[in-house]
Image: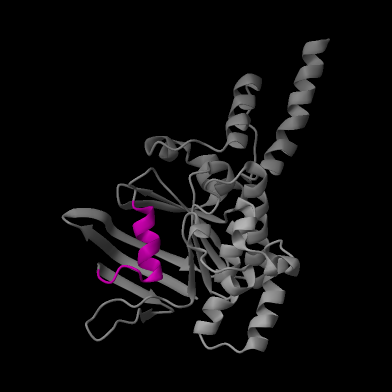
């Protein structure tokens, strides 16, 4: 599916949260949304989900205007899954099983359909069926986060929007969650929109990155193009380079050489700079 915004603006009590934002989001991509606090990131993803009932501009899905109700208000887009910050705070059922089946039951899915969907989803979020009888309060923060995300994935969304999904998680839990989401996205050829302030995560997992600043979309880039070639733009909006790219630039300064790297992924950068750094150490040791 293709999602298109054309000159979309959103105003809150006289304050413009988005200003003439135009973009095209194609399926099968991991697209991260970055920007300082107040840049318009949350408003942008809420527009895509249909959570803001009225705005200026156009929003089309597969070239069709987004549906509106009888009063002309935007309808929530059912094929887009939305995961809020700290989604585990929204868990309210007494067992994990009851939590997972709640939404599918409300949608009228049969018990057999739900059972199959749960069996399919749990391994994809790194959980076993043994967890189904547990009370959510017995689980770790990372497990509760994955349960909350699994409840959204059960509805098989065409696009998954995640608003700071790793907030509050330790580094190991954060990495595990992002890897699981990447596997789900690639396996099902789905679209992920990630709002994050962790530039290392954005560089590692994103295909594309959108940069927002004071309600304006400054650019929609290939991830490697942004982090390797557009450092001035990031500096302009007060965002840091990912740490592997910072290390790359430091090695370039120390060696006096321009190091050609085509990907902003951590392992790619390390594989490129490690031989140079080791050679420099050997030379200095003579």
Q: Residue at left 58%, top 42%? A: 200
202 on left or right of 176: left
Residue 199 lies, with reference to residue 210, above or below; the image says above
Where's residue 14, x and y in %? 16, 55
Q: Residue at left 55%, top 40%? A: 228
Q: Residue at left 30%, top 81%? A: 68
Where's residue 216, x and y in %? 31, 52
Residue 216 lies, with reference to residue 274, above or below; the image says below
Whether 44 is among the magenta residues is: yes
Residue at the limit of the structure toward the left, as seen here: 14
Count of residue discs: 0
- Looking at the rendered image, the quarter that the C terminus falls into is top right
78 on left or right of 171: left
Q: What secondary structure predominates along the stretch shown in magenta?
A: helix
61 on left or right of 241: left
Question: Residue 47 lies in what quarter of the image?
Answer: bottom left
Where's residue 167, x and y in %? 52, 48
What residue span does the magenta drawing correspond to? 40-54
Q: Residue at left 48%, top 62%? A: 90
Q: Is residue 155 visible?
A: no
Whether 81 is among the magenta residues is: no
């Amino acid at each position: 599916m293709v999602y298109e915004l054309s000159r979309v603006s959103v105003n809150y009590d006289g304050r413009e949260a988005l200003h003439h934002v135009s973009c095209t989001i194609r399926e099968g991509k991991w697209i991260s949304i970055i920007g300082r606090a107040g840049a318009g990131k949350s408003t942008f993803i809420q527009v895509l989900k249909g959570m803001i009932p009225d705005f200026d501009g156009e929003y089309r899905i597969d070239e069709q205007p987004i549906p509106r109700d009888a009063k002309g208000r935007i309808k929530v887009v059912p094929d887009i899954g939305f995961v809020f910050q700290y989604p585990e705070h929204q868990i309210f059922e007494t067992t994990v099983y009851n939590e997972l089946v709640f939404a599918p039951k409300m949608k009228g899915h049969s018990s057999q359909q739900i059972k199959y969907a749960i069996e399919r989803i749990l391994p994809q979020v790194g959980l076993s069926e043994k967890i189904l009888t547990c009370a959510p309060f017995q689980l770790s923060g990372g497990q509760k986060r994955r349960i909350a995300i699994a409840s959204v994935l059960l509805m098989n969304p065409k696009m998954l929007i995640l608003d700071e999904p790793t907030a509050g998680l330790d580094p190991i839990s954060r990495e595990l969650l992002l890897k699981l989401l990447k596997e789900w996205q690639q396996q099902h050829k789905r679209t992920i929109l990630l709002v994050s302030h962790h530039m290392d995560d954005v560089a590692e997992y994103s295909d594309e990155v959108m940069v927002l600043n004071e309600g304006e979309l400054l650019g929609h880039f290939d991830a490697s193009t942004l982090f390797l070639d557009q450092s001035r733009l990031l500096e302009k909006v007060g965002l840091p380079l990912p740490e592997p790219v910072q290390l790359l630039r430091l090695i370039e300064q120390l060696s006096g050489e321009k190091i050609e790297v085509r990907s902003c992924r951590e392992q790619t950068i390390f594989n490129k700079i490690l031989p140079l750094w080791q050679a420099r150490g050997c030379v200095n040791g003579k």
